Amino acid sequence: MTPTVPSRESIVAHVRAVLDDTDVRVTRAIVLGSVARDEHDAMSDTDMLVVSPDFEGAPGARRGRPYRDRWECERFGSVDFVEYTPAEYDEYRRREDGLIAVAEREGIPVVSIATEPN
């Protein structure tokens, strides 16, 4: 039996729900990769870029914990969170050729209740 592949819309809705279900102040969140391009399959993960001032001083491995704990792997597959502080995001954004450039060009911005306007 072929596994059911969730729609891009249902994945983005789940991302939004996961972000809204934490106390982390999110200033930017972008779904990128195969889900954003609507080319994902049963083996694809969801790639997420999340920016928050709450990540300041937190080691990388701890930044995404509130999200990973709420992610429904059985239903939506695995997830890869890339987390930046606003200062880190701005620094990497200036490079114009990395992950952030791709995310801004090809990604799906996710609006969260805690999201500040861009």
Image (cartoon, helix red, strand yellow):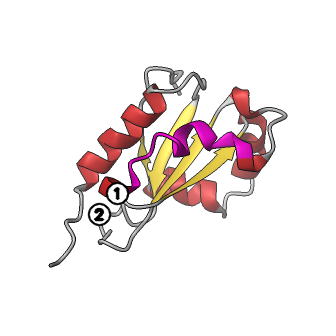
Q: Which residue is at a point 66% across and 64% down the rendered structure image?
A: 97
Q: Which residues are magenta?
A: 62-73
Quarter of the image with the N terminus in it: bottom left
Look at the numbered discs 1 and 2 and tell me whether their residues touch, using CB distance below 8 Å.
no
Q: Which residue is mark 1?
A: 74
Is residue 63 a member of the stretch shown in magenta? yes
- Along the horizontal axis of the image, is 93 left or right of 81? right
Q: Which residue is at a point 23% across and 65% down the rendered structure image?
A: 5
Which is closer to the viewer, label 1 or label 2?
1
Identify which residue, 47 or 89, lies in the foreground. 47
Q: Three-letter amino acid code at disc 2?
A: Asp
Q: Which residue is at a point 66% across and 63% down the rendered structure image?
A: 98
**Which numbered circle lies on residue 38?**
2
Identify which residue, 106 or 16, lies in the foreground. 16
**x, y (%) of residue 20?**
44, 26
Task: Say few, some or many: other residues with alpha carbon within 10 Å of mark 1 (under 14 / 14 to 19 / 20 or more).
Answer: few
**x, y (%) of residue 67?**
53, 40
Q: Is residue 28 above or below residue 8?
A: above
Q: CA distance from mark 1 to mark 2?
A: 20 Å
**x, y (%) of residue 11?**
32, 49
**x, y (%) of residue 77?**
38, 61
- Along the horizontal axis of the image, is 72 left or right of 5? right
Q: Three-letter amino acid code at disc 1?
A: Glu
Residue at far left of view: 1
